[in-house]
Image (cartoon, rainbow, N blue to C red):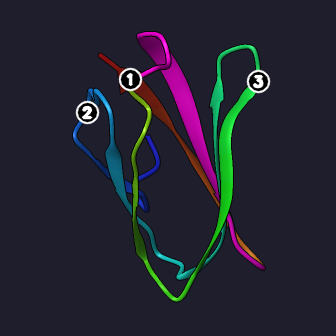
Amino acid sequence: MNRNLKLTPIPFVDRIKIKMPVNEGTYSIYDVSGKIIRMENFYNQNEIEISGLGNIPSGIYFVKIISEDQSYSTKLVKK
C-alpha cells in the first residue's frame, strides 16, 4: 500500500475518500484485468470523494493518481 495515499473506508461499499500529497492531476480506478472503471481529473484539492461505486462487483481494485511529476497507486477492496 502506498503510504502517500490515505483511503477510507477500506473495504468500501459505494464511496471512497482519498487524501493525496498532490492537489492536481488525474485519478483512475481499475480492476485486476486493467479495465478502467472510472477516470477523472481533479484540481485544487488534495482530498477527493468518489461516489457511485455501489454497482461494481465486490473484489480487488486499484487506484492510481497521476500528477504533473508524480504517480501513486494502491489497492482497493470493494465489499
Label 2, secondary structure: give it: loop
The correct choice, above or below, for 44 with respect to 59 in the image is below
Query: Total of numbered circles in the picture?
Result: 3
In the rendered structure, which disc, 2 or 3, sits on the residue that comes first in sequence? 2
Q: CA distance from mark 2 to mark 3?
A: 21 Å
The correct choice, above or below, for 48 with respect to 44 in the image is above
Q: Residue at x 70, y 70 (%)?
A: 70
Q: CA distance from mark 1 to mark 3?
A: 16 Å
Q: Residue at x 33, y 41 (%)?
A: 15
In the rendered structure, which disc, 1 or 3, sits on the residue that comes first in sequence? 3
The correct choice, above or below, for 44 with respect to 14 in the image is below
Q: Residues within 10 Å of mark 1 (few under 14, many from 20)?
A: some
Q: Which residue is mark 2?
A: 10
Q: Residue at x 46, y 49 (%)?
A: 2
Magenta-drawn stretch contains 70: no
- Mark nearest the camera among 1 and 3 is 3
User: What amino acid is at disc 2?
Assistant: Ile
Q: Which residue is mark 3?
A: 35
User: What amino acid is at disc 1?
Assistant: Val
Magenta-drawn stretch contains 61: yes
Query: x, y percentage for residue 61?
Result: 54, 25
Q: Quadrant of the C terminus?
A: top left
Cβ atoms at labels 2 and 1 below 8 Å apart? yes
User: What amino acid is at disc 3?
Assistant: Lys
In the rendered structure, which disc, 2 or 1, sits on the residue that comes first in sequence? 2
Query: x, y percentage for residue 35?
Result: 76, 24
Q: CA distance from mark 2 to mark 1?
A: 6 Å
Q: Which segment is the magenta one?
A: 55-68
Q: Residues within 10 Å of mark 3 (few under 14, many from 20)?
A: few
Q: Which residue is mark 1?
A: 77
Label 1, secondary structure: give it: strand
Query: x, y percentage for residue 44?
Result: 52, 89
